[in-house]
Amino acid sequence: MQISKGVEWAAHAAALLNGLPPGRGLKAEALARYHGVPAPYMAKQLQALSKAGITQTSRGAHGGYRLAKPADEITLWDITAAVDGKGPAFRCTEIRQNGPCGLKPEDCKRPCQIAAAFASAEQAFRDSLAAVSLADLAGQVVNDSQPEHLLDIVSWLTAEAEPLSEKSA
């Protein structure tokens, strides 16, 4: 399975939004600057998260992004599906029906062993990501980080977070 940069960026953005105080939000530009990535591309990922109901956005001078629901209700699979879609990574083309020894379509009522193995692996991948919430990650970051780094993050969030207007997008 290949995970896109967009998923990585969206997951990092959502993890940072988890640290916001209530009623505050971050602009896409601030999130892009924090992560050192292009603002238009970060905005695209945030729009995908908003469309999926993971983030909420407010418009205007005091607009920005925040999580739309508690961090323990948002999983890495939710973020992955929002950015890359829910479609299967492996798409069987029924190659076993091709060539000089190809099977007839009526003999292919069940998926072949190859398609079944890929489907099983993909389900395990999705289940693994669905088992990790943003709240789980936040707890690990707090436990694994140096106190000075955590204070830097809190200071940055305090300086950059905007009070949100009531106009939702």
Image (cartoon, rainbow, N blue to C red):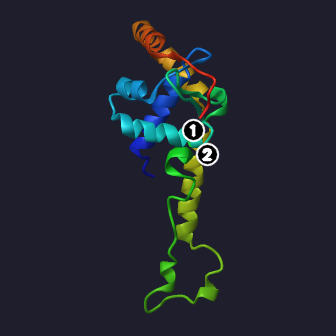
Q: Name the residue nearer the viewer: 16 or 118.
A: 16
Which quarter of the rendering shows the C terminus? top right
Q: Type of residue at label 2?
A: Asp
Residue found 54% across the figure and 52% down from its top: 85
Q: Is residue 97 above or below residue 134?
A: below
Q: Secondary structure at mark 1?
A: helix
Q: Name the residue nearer the viewer: 139 or 36.
A: 36
Q: Tell me the residue that label 2 is attached to.
A: 127
Q: Is residue 76 above or below residue 86?
A: above
Residue 129 appearing in the image: no
Q: Compare marks 2 and 1 and give the one earlier in the sequence.
A: 1
Q: Is residue 142 above or below residue 39?
A: above
Q: Nearer the viewer, mark 2 or mark 1?
A: 1
Q: Type of residue at label 1?
A: Ser
Image quarter of residue 153: top left
Image quarter of residue 117: bottom right
Q: Position of residue 144 (x, y in %)?
A: 47, 17
Residue found 40% across the figure and 11% down from its top: 149
Left or right: 1 as drawn, with respect to 135: left
Q: Position of residue 158 (x, y in %)?
A: 48, 10
Q: Position of residue 26 (x, y in %)?
A: 49, 23
Q: Position of residue 142 (x, y in %)?
A: 51, 15
Residue found 52% across the figure and 43% down from its top: 48
- For the residues labelled 2 and 1, the Cα–Cα distance comes to 23 Å
In the rendering, which numbered label is found on residue 146? none
Q: Name the residue nearer the viewer: 168 or 144.
A: 168
Image quarter of residue 151: top left
10 Å neighbourhood of mark 2: few (<14), some, or many (≥20)?
few
Residue 144 appearing in the image: yes
In the rendering, which numbered label is found on residue 50? 1
Whether label 2 touches label 1, CB < 8 Å: no
10 Å neighbourhood of mark 1: few (<14), some, or many (≥20)?
some
